[in-house]
Image (cartoon, rainbow, N blue to C red):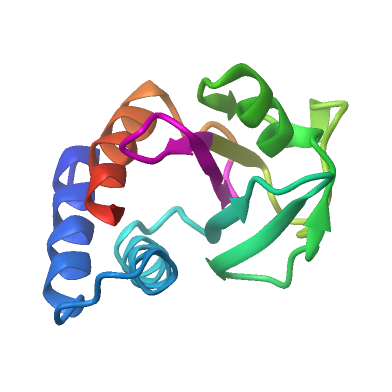
Amino acid sequence: MHKEGLYKRAEARFLAQLHGADQLVPKMATLVAALHEQIPYFNGCGFYFCEEPEMEVGPYQGKVVCAKIGYHGICGKAAKTGKAVIVADAKHYKERIICDEKTQSEMALPVYDPEKRLVAVFYAESHAKGSFDEEDAELIEHIFPLLF
């Protein structure tokens, strides 16, 4: 199945499981579970809330991650630049925060609320190099407004 089909399936699964939930954290938890379940190359995925002075872990699926991280690594770069960060070969990314030694590629995207305030950063990891591209970023960004 092509990426678009995988993400549409994950979005449908997410929407089907909301059962009227209207709070951000339950919606985030449901979204990461749907993405982790439906996208075969996602080893882990989740959110970091953009708090001060450090980002704090939000809902996620996969290996245990750091509860707090500074504004560095791919999540920090996505928060600071306001743009998607895609790393095809994580072993060569100097600012990498290592949670899962098997991670080969990563992606992080800023998440904005309807008032254009940075709320969180979404991240995804894969055990294969080159798993993520601009198509992944665009397809996930299309789902984010459903969180609010």
The residue that appears at 62% across and 39% down in the rendered structure is 105
Asked whether 88 or 72 is in front, the reply is 72
Q: Is residue 114 magenta?
A: yes
Look at the image and give the residue range highlighted in magenta: 109-128
Q: Is residue 94 magenta?
A: no
Asked whether 124 or 92 is in front, the reply is 124
The residue that appears at 24% across and 36% down in the rendered structure is 142
Residue 51 placement (x, y as % from top left): 70, 49
86 versus 71 height, above or below: above
Asked whether 80 or 130 is in front, the reply is 80
The residue that appears at 47% across and 33% down in the rendered structure is 117
Question: Please, what is the dominant secondary structure of the magenta stretch?
Answer: strand
Q: To which quarter of the image does residue 50 belong? A: top right
Q: To which quarter of the image does residue 28 belong? A: bottom left
Q: Is residue 6 left or right of residue 84?
A: left
Residue 106 can be seen, yes or no:
yes
The residue that appears at 38% across and 74% down in the rendered structure is 26
Residue 80 placement (x, y as % from top left): 68, 23
Residue 129 placement (x, y as % from top left): 59, 36
Residue 64 placement (x, y as % from top left): 73, 72
69 versus 13 height, above or below: above
